[in-house]
Amino acid sequence: SVSSSVVGEASKDKLLGGLLSAEFEECSCFSRYRSAAYRKASPHLPSPYLVERLRRYEALHRKCGPNTELYKKSIERLKSKQSSAAMECNYIVWIPHYGLGNRVVSLVSSFLYALLNDRVLLVHVPHELTDLFCEPFPGTSWVLPSDFPVHNFQNFDKGTPQSYGNMLRDKVISNDMRFSANATLPAYAYLHLPWYYNEWDKLFFCQDAQQMLRKFPWLLLKSDHYFVPSLFLVEEYDDELRRLFPERTTVFHHLVRYLLHPSNTVWGYVTRYYHAYLAKADKRVGIQIRNLKNEPVPFETLLSQIVNCSSKEGILPSIDLRRPARPAEDDAKVKAVFTTSLDSGYSDRIRDMYYEHATTTGEIVGVYQASHEVEQRTEQQNHNIKALSEITLLSFSDVLITTACSTFGYVAQGLGGLEPLILTKPWKSKLPCRWAKSPEPCFLIPPPSDVCRDHGGINKKMAQHVRQCEDENGGIKLF
Ligand code: GDP
């Protein structure tokens, strides 16, 4: 376990089995090579083929990245307002949407899409996302330059005429264009994939669309979900995905650890907190509590759900109700519980419980929460720094408890490679909690399973590898 020997622990593979490039200066981003020492060693190695493809991707990004000659050439094509075929360098521009967890899962999904299509991923970084993440690709940048010529793309949404769905509906394009060598196309297409996407937008996940979209040098994408499971249903990605991920349930775990490294600012928050409160414990338990305003669970109900589930599953000890209870021994084992929530109430009550009572096992339990921000304030950089710090701290847990359907928890479980105990929504499940089968996130709002019936079909073989999520009946998850 990690305590004072954190830094420089030679036995831990700081490159994560070759997942990370060794080309970076360590001090430009301490978290990149140091996070591994704070986590349990991952039992999942990336495949040699994934490692090879990542190095190839990095070379492509260096060749086509912002301010290269090839980038300028592709920008000229974009300004000319027309395209007819792919270029030497083709791009996908990611547009942030909703909370930080939503952003991370959609960003990781977009990166896999880029990888599968030899596109270069560029990221729009609004002020509230500055100084949150390190650059993931050596010798270049993934930040979309501020002089990107598409007007107002940050506000693209369902009504945008250039969305793939709307262009299809309005017959500006058709998927048959994938066959024609000299069809004239608009210079870019906007992929509208947030939860409120319509049936036209959803055709994105069909093989015909995937082939047609390859003719666009520029794609802009907005999503708030982990849409990777639906990419696994596209027949022509089948072979490549099998080679990349022989262990399908590690897709997010590998890609999020590859892509997302907290900036030195965030890493400062993380390490200060960790060493002050968590490092010396014998075991660390993370509890991510998300009580949504629009479908709230009563405070006492959620509190007892947390306490009952964690004791029933042996994650936290029960309290000893004898009076007087045994005092703590000098050498008692210490469990540190790190909670995250917008409220302070849950953490206060659990802490009081273990202050006022001994445990039946003689263990001592300390309960800590780094912030209670009261409200989601995604537009504020300092708020997001805390959110990312807390997601990272949760990922250092030995055991993790998360709230159903929260992308905040998904990111923590993916970074940590943890199978969390999920606190279910009382109106969705008879059981108060259930274990996730893998660290994979759920695609909470996938297109209907027959969406591609007339558009390239779905791959029946691959469909067997996607299952209903533990936390959302309508969602799908890699299996
Ligand atoms: P989701 O809505 O649960 O899927 O998660 P998101 O991360 O997408 O959005 C929730 C946002 O609310 C976070 O990004 C934070 O800005 C804020 N938030 C929610 N829970 C917490 C928490 O426990 N700690 C902190 N610091 N922020 C939180």
Image (cartoon, rainbow, N blue to C red):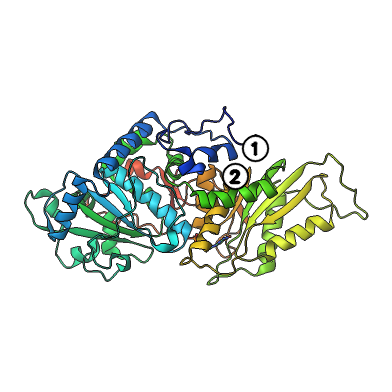
Please state, as top left, top right, bottom left or bottom right, where the C terminus lies in the image: top left
Q: How far across and down, in percent of the image, does residue 118 sit?
A: 26, 42
| Amino acid under disc 2 | Phe
Please say if the residues under marks 2 and 1 sit with CB atoms less than 8 Å apart. Answer: yes
Q: Is residue 8 left or right of residue 197?
A: right
Q: How far across and down, in percent of the image, does residue 384 sit?
A: 50, 60
Determine the image quadrant of residue 240: top left
* Mark pair 2, 1: CA separation: 10 Å
Q: Residues within 10 Å of mark 1 (few under 14, many from 20)?
A: some
Q: Is residue 215 left or right of residue 221?
A: left
Residue at x 51%, y 42% (from the top left corner)? 30
Q: How far across and down, in percent of the image, does residue 18 sit?
A: 43, 31
Residue at x 19%, y 54% (from the top left corner)? 75
Q: How far across and down, in percent of the image, does residue 399 sit?
A: 63, 45
Q: Nearer the viewer, residue 410 or 220?
A: 220
Residue at x 46%, y 67% (from the top left corner)? 379
Q: Kindly identify which residue carries mark 1.
A: 2
Q: Kindly identify which residue carries mark 2.
A: 396
